Amino acid sequence: MNAGVVIFPGSNCDRDTYWALSHTGLNVSYLWHEDSELGDVDFVILPGGFSYGDYLRTGAFARFSPVMRAVSDFAGKGGIVLGICNGFQILQEAGLLPGAMLPNKSLRFICDWTYISIENRNSPFTSNIRDGNVLKIPIAHFEGNFFCDDENLERIESNGQVVFRYSDESGDVILSRNPNGSLNNIAGISNERGNVLGMMPHPERASEEILGSDDGKRIFKSVAEWLTGNS
């Protein structure tokens, strides 16, 4: 199975993501933002960073990169796509995921560890995580406050599109563990089909125990196992 990590001008988590993926049995390569084709990939990742400097709005410029047309086509055919932090924002700008990201409620950049509860185990990103319901994964963002209107929020919730919520270490979803003000403690959502996921926490930064947690690798391994089982 082959994974591709997209690099935009300003991406800064591409190598971390490459490293984490390469330890899950996937063959990993880089994809350049000017590429118009993805090649032979089964899994596409938009990493974190500050694409195009976030000068206009997070993800707004990256959304028009040639590679995003290919990513949209890939997703439309059922391809597995993961957007992490800035990658999540890009997926929203591209219309592949609902909602938008507002500045954190504190109006400060937050870099800290969080716990997230797994809300949907039918997702390719979680279906093979067999033990436990809580992951310890860090965040690092200024605009991670998930927002949408009431109608879209009801649709997201009723469709089971919420994959991760901010929680305490026991998995209790409580307001005091919501780091940025996101509606309903939402930390990660999928599209209706379930093949596209956006998440604000950084699983690639929790891929080895020496980093403080290797829970993030479980998400990548879940995708690898899901792809192998459905190939």
Image (spheres, grey):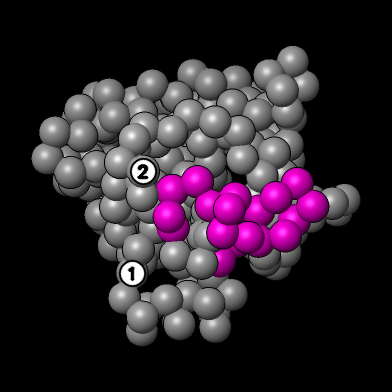
Identify the residue at image location x=31%, y=76%: 149
Q: Residues within 10 Å of mark 1 (few under 14, many from 20)?
A: some
Q: Amino acid at mark 2?
A: Ser
Say whether residue 181 is magenta: yes
Residue drawn at x 48%, y 29% as measured from the top left: 111
Q: Secondary structure at mark 1?
A: loop
158 lies left or right of 55 = right
User: Which quadrant would residue 76 be assigned to in this image?
Assistant: bottom left
Could you say where residue 174 lies in the image, as x and y percent from the top left?
63, 60
Measure the C-alpha gap from mark 2 to mark 1.
19 Å
Give the position of the N terminus as an image quadrant: top right
Labelled disc at residue 148: 1
Of 5 and 16, the residue lying toward us: 16
> Hey, what amino acid is under mark 1?
Cys
Residue 123 placement: quadrant: bottom right
The answer to whether residue 38 is seen in the rendering is no
What is the total number of numbered labels drawn onto the structure image? 2
Find disc 2 in the rendering and name its residue.
106
**Magenta includes 169?**
yes
| Residue stretch in magenta | 162-182
Q: Decide which of tag 2 and tag 1 comes sooner along the chain.
A: 2
Quadrant (top left/top right/bottom left/bottom right) for the C terminus:
bottom right
The answer to whether one can see residue 56 in this image is yes
In this rendering, the label closer to the viewer, 2 or 1: 2
Q: In the visual, does 71 lie left or right of 18? A: left
